[in-house]
Image (cartoon, helix red, strand yellow):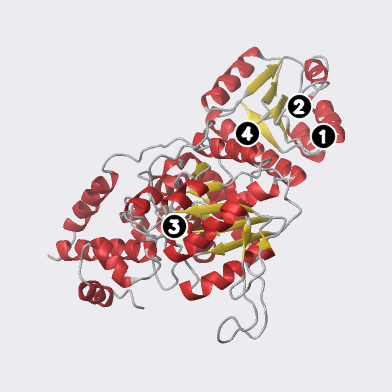
Amino acid sequence: MKPIWIVDDDQSIRFVLQKALERAGLPVRSFASARDVQQALATEQPQVLVSDIRMPGGSGITLLQELKRSQPQLPVIIMTAYSDLDSAVSAFQSGAFEYLSKPFDVDKAVDLIRRAVDESLREQGVASGGLETPELLGRAPAMQDVFRAIGRLSPSLVTVLITGESGTGKELVAQALHRHSPRAQGPFVAINTAAIPRDLLESELFGHERGAFTGAQTARRGRFEQADGGTLFLDEIGDMPYELQTRLLRVLSDGHFYRVGGHAPIRANVRVIAATHQNLEQRVRDGLFREDLYHRLNVIRLRLPALRERREDIELLVRHFLHKSAAELGVETKRVSEQALAVLQSYAFPGNVRELQNLCHWLTVMAPGLVIDVKDLPPELVGTPAAPVTAAAGVEPAQGLAQGPAQGPAQGPDAAAPAGEAAAPRVPAPAAAWEIQLAALAREMLQGPGGDVMERLTQRFERAVILAALESTHGRRIEAAQRLGIGRNTITRKIQELGLDD
C-alpha cells in the first residue's frame, strides 16, 4: 500500500495525525505546503491525501481540483474549520472524499482515513484486477501475508495446497491465483470432491466414454478436460476416496489420464490447486490419504487464517457485506453501532467469513433500524460467542459450524516444502476463551428462574459438538460417531432429541 500524505502548514496537526496513523499501522508522509506535494507527485503517488484548506503557497481546494484532473480515483480529505462552511461545500463540489472539521477527534480522523484507504484499494483492485477481491479484504498481518504469497505464487504454475478452516475463503484464493497467472485467459474449473458420491467422482474428474457404464449414453468430458489450458481447483481434497487418489497421483506425475472406459491417453494441460480443511498429515498417518499424493500436492502450502485470528478485519468485512446485501436487496445500507461491533469482534465465528457474510445478510433483512445495535444481534451470539449464530425469532441466518480441534491451528507444519515459505504465520487463539465465555453464560443463566441450567447448557454443548462432527464428515453419521467416540445409536438419538433432523 502506498503512504497516506498529510498536507498542513501547522506542524502540530501534521505531528498528531502522523503519529496516530503510524500507531494504526498505516504508512504516512507529511508536507508543509501544497507546493511540496506538487513536487513530490512528479515521482510518487499517495494512497489517500489529507489536506488543509488554507495554506500559504496554494489552497487545498486548488490542489484537490488539480488531483481530480490527473488522478480522479485518489480519495482526498479536506480539513477545514467549523466556521468554514462555504469551503466545505466547495470541497465536495470539487470531488473531495470527505471533509474533516477542526478541531477533530483523532480516533475519528483515523477511522475516516481508513475508510478512504479501503475505497482507494477497492478502486485500485477494480482498475487493475488487483488481488483483493471483496471477500479477501483484510488489513491484518496474517491476511497481508496471504496477499503477498498470492503475488509471489501467481506467475508460476507450481501446485499449491491451500489449508484452513471451512469458510475462510479457500476458493477465492484459488481464483486469485488463477486470475493473476499466465493461464488467466484459460478456464477456472472447481470441483468439491467431498460433495460428489464416490461412484460418480471418477467420471466427474476424468470423463467417460459412451457405454462405459449403465446410463452412459454419450461420451462426456471430465473436469480435467474442461480445465484444459487453465486451472483445476480440487476442493476438500482430504476427503477424496482412497482408490481415486491413485488415479489423481498418476495424472499429477505423468500429465496423462484415461476417461472411464477409454483406451486413448489424454494430456492434462492444467494447473492443479487443491484445498482442504483436514489435517492431511494425520490422515496420512491414519491410512486415509496416500503419502505420495500428499507430497505431490504439498509443493507450496498456503494457510488461510481463521477470522478469530484477524479480528481487526471484522469491521471492514461487516461494512462490505452490509453494503453488498443492501445492494442485492435494493435497500439502504445499514451501519453497526460501536457496541454491536465490539460484540462481533469478541465472537469466535466458527464459520469464519462465510458465517459473518450470512449474519450480515440476515441483519440487513431483520434489523429494524438503519443502525444495528446489540439488541438486534442474534441472542445466541451475544450470550455465547463461541456458539454457532442462530436467529432471534422466526428467520434464521445460515449457521456457521464449529470445527474440530484438528482443523484449525493444529494443522501440522504449514510451511512451503521448498525454500521460500508461502504460509501465513500462525496466531494462536486465546487460551481457554470458550471456558471463560461458558462460565459467563452460566452465571447469567443462574440469575434467572428455573433449576435446569445444567440441562440447557448440556443440550447447547451437545448440539454444537454434533453439528461440528457432522460438518467435518459431510453428514456421514457413522463416521461422525466414530470421531466423537460414541455409538451409532447414540448419535442418532441425540440428533432426534436436539431436533437436528429438522
Q: Residues within 10 Å of mark 4 (few under 14, many from 20)?
A: many
Who comes first in sequence, dot 3 or dot 4? 4
What's the residue at 76%, 16% (across, down)? 33
Residue 95 visible (yes or no) = yes
Residue at x 43%, y 54% (from the top left corner): 277
| Dot 1 crowding, Cα within 10 Å, few <14, some 14–19, many 20+ | few
The disc label shown at residue 113, or none: 4
The disc label shown at residue 462, or none:
none
Q: Earlier in the sequence, mark 1 or mark 4?
A: 1
Numbered label tally: 4
Tag 4–tag 2 contact (CB < 8 Å) = no
Give the quadrant of residue 207: bottom right
**Which element carries disc 2, helix, strand or loop?**
loop
Specify whether 322 is left or right of 388.
right
Q: Which mark is residue 71?
A: 1
Q: Nearer the viewer, residue 211 or 340?
A: 211
Say which element carries label 4.
helix
For marks 1 and 2, give the CA distance: 9 Å
Asked whether disc 1 touches disc 2, contact meaning CB atoms under 8 Å apart, the reply is yes
In the depicted structure, whether residue 259 falls above or below residue 465 = below
Q: Is residue 27 left or right of residue 9?
A: left
The residue tagged 2 is 45
The residue carrying mark 3 is 238
